[in-house]
Image: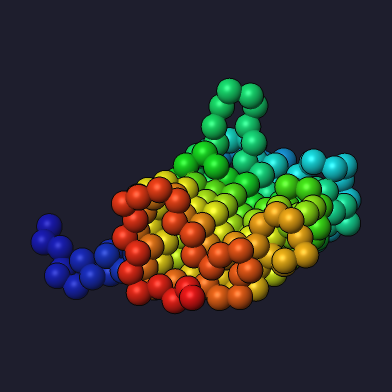
Amino acid sequence: MKIPVAFFPVVLAFGAIIVAPRVGAQAQDSRQEGPTEIDKCQAISQSGSYKLVNNLTFNGPSGSSCLPITVSNVTIDLAGFSIISLNPQAVAIAATPPSGQVAEGIVVRNGSISGFNQGVVALGGGSIVEGLRLSGNYEPFATGISAAGIVKGNTVVGFVGIRGSGVGIGATGIITGNFVEGNGSGMAIGLGSTVIGNTAVNNGSVELPDGGFGITVDCPSNVTDNTAVGNPRGNLVLNGSGCNNTNNVAP
């Protein structure tokens, strides 16, 4: 029997009606996948992406962390929220896996951290710390950011430490576009780093016996287009030889 030509569009249209809801459901399911939401201080023991959904307040014991990370390859988006400490000797976010291991590929971005002795600790390599606003205190070992990787576009103030020993940013890697002010020292940068476009002002005090440096860099490193002023014990200090020291404003 000859099938009318008009039959085929009808069959195709009917097939589309059947398939379309299934495809739509798959797309919806895909859209529902995303970062794991964080609404309280907690340990992070699985690799993946996380995001804050509200401000966090931490009142744990000294030396403990609001968000301890025990695995590699973790991304935490603060999503514009704040992490606040009621214990000035605590740590906000620390990649500190069990002894003998190293957590690598830690990413922390986009929010505020205040009141902690240490802000972000991510020393395992391949880390990214960007877009944070950190304010610290006078407690021992005060450090805003400790990282190995990329440290970009952060503002760090008030990590003074006892005797002025605190540091705004202690890092190795690519350190660019950061602003540090009112810390024991502004930035302490490790060997083989790229240090571009940072600003360090008024870190340290002549009344405090330690600190007082704007930017210290271990050479060889690339040190370009930075501004360091008002740091009483040295604005830009290059340790060793072999640094590219270009276009820096550091009287």
Q: Position of residue 27 (x, y in %)?
A: 45, 60
Q: Residue at x 62, y 41 (%)?
A: 95
Position of residue 155 in the picture relative to residue 210 (left or right): left
**Figure check: 64 above or below 78:** above
Residue plotted at (56% across, 65% down): 234
Residue 230 percent coordinates (x, y): 61, 75
In this view, the residue in front, 251 or 150, is: 251
- The answer to whether residue 198 of the structure is visible from this angle is yes
Q: Quadrant of residue 55?
A: bottom right
Any part of residue 178 in sight:
no
Q: Position of residue 238 (x, y in %)?
A: 44, 56
Judged left or right of residue 27, residue 188 is: right
Residue that sits furthest to the top in the current view: 100
Colour option used: rainbow
Name the residue at the left extreme. 2
Residues 33 and 105: in front is 105
- Front residue of 13/197: it is 197
The answer to which of 117 and 2 lies nearer the viewer is 117
Is 136 rendered above or below residue 177?
above
Q: Quadrant of residue 70?
A: top right
Residue 141 location, x and y as percent? 73, 47
| Residue drawn at (28%, 64%) of the image | 11
What residue is rendered at 42% in x and 61% in y? 195
Left or right: where 133 falls relative to 251: right
Check the picture and name the quadrant holding the N terminus: bottom left
